[in-house]
Amino acid sequence: MKRPIRVFKFGGASLKNADAVRNVTEILKRYADEQLLIVVSAMGKTTNALEVVAASHAAQDGKAFDVLNEIKQQHYEIIGELFGDQAQETIVSVNDAFVEVEWVLEEEPYENYDYMYDQIVSVGEIVSSKIVSAYLAHAGLPTQWLDARDIILTDNIYREGWVQWEETQHRALQTAKPMLEKGGFVLTQGFIGSTSENFTTTLGREGSDYTAAIFSFCLDAEDMTIWKDVPGVLTADPRVFENVTKLDRLSYREAIEMTYYGAKVIHPKTIKPLQNKSIPLLVKSFINPDGAGTYISDEVEDNYPPMVAIEGDQALLNISTRDFSFVAEQHIRELFNIIAELRIQVNMMQNSAISFSLSVNDIDDKVDQFAERVQEQYKVTIDRGLELITIRHFKKDILDSLRRGKIILLEERIKNTTLQMVVKDVPVMRRKPGALPD
Ligand code: ADP
Ligand code: ASP
Ligand code: MG
């Protein structure tokens, strides 16, 4: 009988230095007999640094090569530590990838920033995957390197490519499956795809989880595991909250609701492909691989503890008609056509007779573009720098504690399960020590 295909994803934190790569290798040794497709992200914070390279090149501020050289150096150091005197082959192949970025930097910045961004930023995943696959082979785990761009076909919206599912599935079955059947691991990149003209695209920041789900769907995986620096999905982000607890099991529905509204532990697009084929998702710790992690599946469990997700960078738009006409279907259609065109994520909305409020993710200059497009017909006010707090299965004491010190600009309850609020901090006035009025 054929062994089932399993998909693993390792993110930047699990590959941040040579020790981290060794740790991942130790984890993978436990799965040496499995048919395993491994998806890796760029190492550590490489993508952030590559974003600086792209922005510097666009601004022509003379810093792009310096930042790129720093990134190259970090990678060569990791290769040196991992391979010792057998580093040459990997250095050459990683250097080939960086040279392609240097070619972009030697030219004038392209007019299409998003296109240029993808050509530069994608190198993080390419070099990471080359290093990890070479190291696995070096450590006695035969591994084939697969270029995800040969499988994942997207449209040509750069920085947010949309997957063309039929062709992607066809290619996965034609190319990736036979590689897996040959035996050994197959290792590929998260986050990247390509257009029908073979230009590299990216799927949106943090998109490697999504890549793993695309492969899982296309290959009918038995299950998918994402390896994180936390024990599993927790009731809130442990960087922001104390007293968080791990959820042992979660339904797809809970997972999608929480991640859509900012629980950063899983990319929100990850759940749908898995749910569509009932493929369970495990979130496990690369620090404690023996831990059970969180198991996300179809199973419905209605006894969840309160869970909190916080999405920063919210803009609250208040849109009202200039002539006091009602904000009715025709207006809403017009406004939403523009929102869809600009691919703005709307998190909350409320309308009254002549006005409409929207809380949206304030990314790039999309909100300004929106305001510009509608201002002739509507009066638009924008409040920026806000937070969206989403609480599922809320309890009064949790609500009270989250509201403390905040001004609530918009709030909504959805049945008894969800409460959302858009908030900003109450401005604090502090007395100068010892100062008294005359
Ligand atoms: P990756 O290395 O795969 O990119 P991320 O850093 O993107 O991983 O995601 C893991 C981080 O997500 C954790 O370190 C944690 O701070 C954060 N996080 C946010 N919300 C949650 C949550 N509800 N449960 C667990 N982790 C969370
Ligand atoms: N490296 C990409 C990013 O940092 C994709 C990912 O890590 O999931 O956004
Ligand atoms: Mg990440």
Image (cartoon, rainbow, N blue to C red):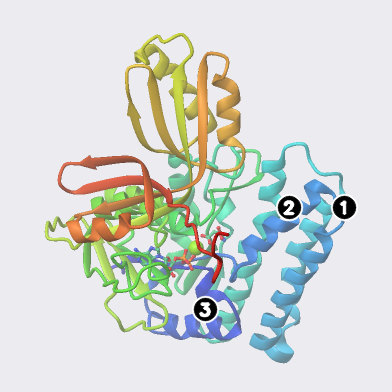
Is 206 or 430 nearer to us in this picture? 430
Instruction: Relative to 362, say whether 429 is above or below.
Output: below
Secondary structure at badge 2 equals helix
Residue 28 sits in quarter: bottom left
Q: Amino acid at mark 2?
A: Ala
Question: Separation of disc 3 and disc 2 at Cα?
Answer: 35 Å
Image coords of residue 180 (percent x, y): 44, 65
Towards the viewer: 50 or 27: 50
Q: Which mark is residue 187?
A: none
Which secondary structure lies at badge 3?
loop
Around disc 3, counting alpha carbons within 10 Å, would you say few (fewer than 14), some (14 to 19), or many (20 or more)?
Answer: some
* Residue type at numbered disc 1: Glu
- Residue 54 numbered mark, or none: 2
Please report the residue visible at 46 percent of the width from the left and 8 percent of the height from the top.
Answer: 323
Badge nearest the viewer, 1 or 2? 2
Mark before the other along the chain sequence, 3 or 2: 2
- Residue occupied by mark 3: 142
The relative height of residue 195 versus residue 42 in the rendered view (above or below) is above
Residue nearer the viewer, 212 or 121: 121
Q: Which residue is at a point 20% across and 61% down the rendered structure image?
A: 397
Q: In the structure shown, which secondary structural element does the residue marked by tag 1 occupy?
A: helix
Marks 1,2: beta carbons within 8 A: no
Q: Quadrant of the N terminus?
A: bottom left
Q: Real-space Cα distance between discs 1 and 2?
A: 12 Å
Is ligand 1 within 8 Å of the beta carbon of the residue shown at mark 3?
no
Whether residue 238 appears in this view of the structure is yes
Mark 1 lies on residue: 106
Residue 404 percent across, percent down from the top left: 33, 57
- Find ligand 1 in the image and state its quadrant: bottom left
Q: Whole-percent x and y of residue 375?
A: 56, 19
Q: Quadrant of the C terminus?
A: bottom right
Q: Nearer the viewer, residue 26 or 254?
A: 254
